[in-house]
Image (tube, coloured by chain):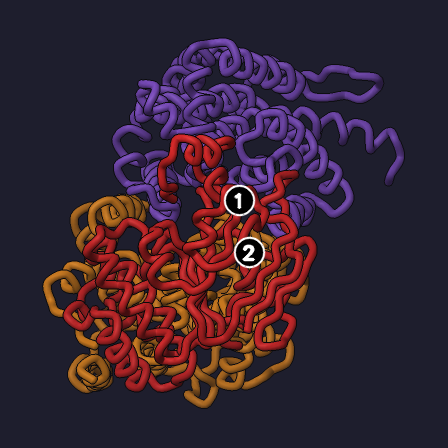
Chain colours: A orange, B purple, C red
Amino acid sequence: MKTLYAILVLCGAVALLPAFVSSGVVLNLVIMTLYATLLGQAWNILAGFGGQYSFGHAAFFGTGAYASAALQVHFGVNAWLCLPAAMACGAAVGALVGALSFRYGLRGSYFALVTLAFAEVFRILANSVKFTGGGVGLLVPLKSSALDFQFQGKAGFLYVILALTLAGFLLSWWLKRSRYGAWLTAVRDNEDSAAALGVDVFRVKLQAIVISAGLMAAGGAFYVQYFHYIDPHIAYGPAVSVDALLGPIVGGLGTVFGPLLGAAALQLLGELTRNLMGDAPGVSLMIYGAVLIAMVTFLPRGIGGVFWRLAPKAP
Amino acid sequence: MLELSILFPSLLNGLTTGAVYALIALGLTLIYGVLHIINFAHGALLMIALYGVFFLNAKLGLDPYAALPIMVPAMFALGYALQRFVIGPASHGKDENILLATLGLTLILENFALYAWRSDTRAIETPYTFSTVAIAGAMISTPKVVAFFGALAATAILLAFITRSDLGRAIRAVARERQGAKLVGIDVEHVFAMSFGIGLACLGAAACFLLPAYYVNPQVGNGFVLIAFTIVVLGGMGSFAGALLSGFIIGVVESVGGLWLGESLGQIGIFVIFIAILLFRPQGIFGART
Amino acid sequence: MLEARHVSISFGGLKAVEDASLAVPAGSITSLIGPNGAGKSTLFGILSGFLKPDTGSVSFLGQDVTGLAPHRICRLGMTRTFQIVQPFAGQTVRENIAVGSHLHRAQRKAALAHAESIALRVGLSGQLDRPAQDLTIAGRKRLELARALATEPKLLLLDEVLAGLNPQEVSEMSPVIRSIRVSGVTVLMIEHVMQAVMNLSEHTWVLNNGHLIAEGKPADVTRDPRVIEAYLGRGAAERLRTSGNEAHA
């Protein structure tokens, strides 16, 4: 219950932000932090709760992004309608990847590699096919109405990404207190024991990847509306897959607030780096890489894990 | 299009690329076979080696082949240090940790290269860059032919070392039975670090053979990672013969695939093979069914 | 209740279990014994769906369950434990047991409450909110038992649930196992601890090198020369007899 209140208070506070802050820079910072949180929440569902580490989550992101962009560019579909469509497409790709990988028992590193391969296949296809604009990508036409999922100021985008991350929070909270969540974490911790206790391991994993993919695709659709442009490298390249996993690992896998903590910490680190070292390319990512290694070596539970150790466990 | 006059050179080119791929994959399969870790940073480390060869040429005028005696030991030392001080401590024995640690390493290396050397693609020019060799009527570029024989020679040396030397025996012991090796007094941590070092030494050699016929930028590693993994998995994790054979197979698949589907789409064949192998025959050609 | 008919399985040319048949009567405590490597856990694997036999069939409550997936067999009412206990690390004892409870309960609250009652039965009440990985080996064995009990099985397959426990811990667990049978659950256990086999089980099967070599009351079976030889080597029965010693198995 406490967690739920925390979620609602937090989101409420952010919702009130545009009333007090008009700086585009600050609002953009909050939007990008929430956007990174959303990607992390999606990855966290499959990896943090489900124990299946995907290195190719871009496959779902890119599909959502391209689905939304292509529907608008080629068929003139309203951008709002594209959001559920994008999520459905992403979920479908998730089902495909999951059905194949889990049916054939791929786990651990093999699963990570196969997801990477899928993302790469999609990237090559997107690069070669006219529907996705080939190497040039797709440019979403500039509109100025909220009815077209584009906004004059940042506030509109803030509300949308906030709504999406709220959904992510509620989903994670539900996983913590539902039967499905108990099954999922059981599968994560020991598949054989879970099966012996009546858990349908394949089905549980498949459901997890579908949910995770759908949420990731929503991130893709949001990206397209915010930046107006998508190409194979942005959509399916390794950068977005890395973005998705950095937050939860830093903030705490399998927790409700881990992705947010991680996204915020990394954003802060990025800003600090930028202030100290200027806009030199690659510096913040270098630091993220070092943070990743440090996390894995010293703080496998992430920042959130430090609190886990201190606070008593709430049922 | 399937005319022999077009297919034959493509096949030969595929074989020359394949030899270098095999050398790269050999390092990767050694690392997996001994340490049971999937070195995700293999591509980025190759990229670093390529930059090494590039700068030795650009700043010191050193011919890439002459750089072998420098690159191989240097990469070996780098590998030893990385395993001993970074990857080993990070692993805590967990699969996922190593995956993430090597991913972190990749991030650091790629972005360091981006920061230090910008994103421009660099290539070198040697007196023989544009010369070709005639093989049964096909004109194959000289650097590629040298790469072919060089990679094979390096592979032969590596295999001889693994099978004949004391260290090679220790490595094979640790690969087969870690605890048992420890019990007979083998310093397992040292063997791990040596193996990782040898794996990277292969990259050093591969870079010397690769650069004259190729190029380098901070992102090249990405392209090689999946190809290297495809080769290793196709051949069977930990199998040298497998890595060698698969290297050639993949080199040819890439070359002929590019002929058929065009440069960009051609690579898709490789990844489809990769996915198929992982799903349907994960032990590869020579691997044992676990 | 449970019947295995002529089940065999080989792994890469090695016959792990060959032509094994047994019938577990409802409401009983029975046991499966044999030297290390005899194939007992493999047989459990076949019975519980983790392994598909090459030949033979398994039926549970009159239904053919040969090769059925483990979770389906669990839902039919047969739950197994594992010899090498692996709790769900990163979760508390209560949460661990709740996974079992969830089989018949959809609500989280109900599952957690049920987990608490199960913990009481096996003597883990004091540890409910501790991380499972902090438990001692005895505690983990109890947890393994508790998780399986929480699924409310009709038949419980216990794989060396007493292994690694000291004599006092064994004597604490025995009444728990008896009470399980009293509550209406049939038990088939793999055991090495002969004291428990003798005290608890009414019928035992002996497995050696994948073959069922004897069955019957534990007291009789342990005097069977074939069984003695299985444990102590060929000719041991004869040597023991001629040297006039009572056989200990």
Q: Chain of mark 1?
A: C
Assess disc 2: are there few (<14), some (14-19) or many (≥20) residues with their C-alpha within 10 Å of its C-alpha. Answer: some
Q: Which mark is residue C208?
A: 1
Which amino acid type is shown beneath numbered disc 1? Asn
Which amino acid type is shown beneath numbered disc 2? Gly
Disc 1 is placed on an element classified as strand
Q: Quadrant of the N terminus of chain C?
A: bottom right
Query: Does residue B261 sit above or below B126 in this rendering?
Result: below
Query: Does residue A236 sit above or below C1 in this rendering?
Result: above
The residue located at (33%, 42%) in the rendering is: B93
Judging by the rendered image, the residue that carries numbered circle 2 is A105
Query: Does residue B64 sit above or below A1 in this rendering?
Result: above
Q: Position of residue B258 (x, y in %)?
A: 71, 41
Q: Which mark is residue A125?
A: none
The residue located at (57%, 66%) in the rendering is: C23
Residue A262 seen in the figure: no
Q: Quadrant of the C terminus of chain C?
A: top left
Q: Nearer the viewer, residue B125 or A245?
A: A245
Query: Does residue C187 sit above or below C85 in this rendering?
Result: below
Residue A75 seen in the figure: yes
**Does residue C170 appear to the left or right of C207 in the view shown?**
left
Measure the alpha-carbon separation of dots 1 and 2. 32 Å
Assess disc 1: are there few (<14), some (14-19) or many (≥20) residues with their C-alpha within 10 Å of its C-alpha. Answer: many
Q: Position of residue A53 (x, y in %)?
A: 42, 56
Asked which quadrant contains residue C180, the reply is bottom left
Disc 2 is placed on an element classified as loop
Farthest right residue in view: B3
Pair 1/2: label in front? 1
The residue located at (29%, 26%) in the rendering is: B81
Q: Position of residue B177 (x, y in %)?
A: 43, 29
Q: Position of residue C5 (x, y in %)?
A: 65, 61
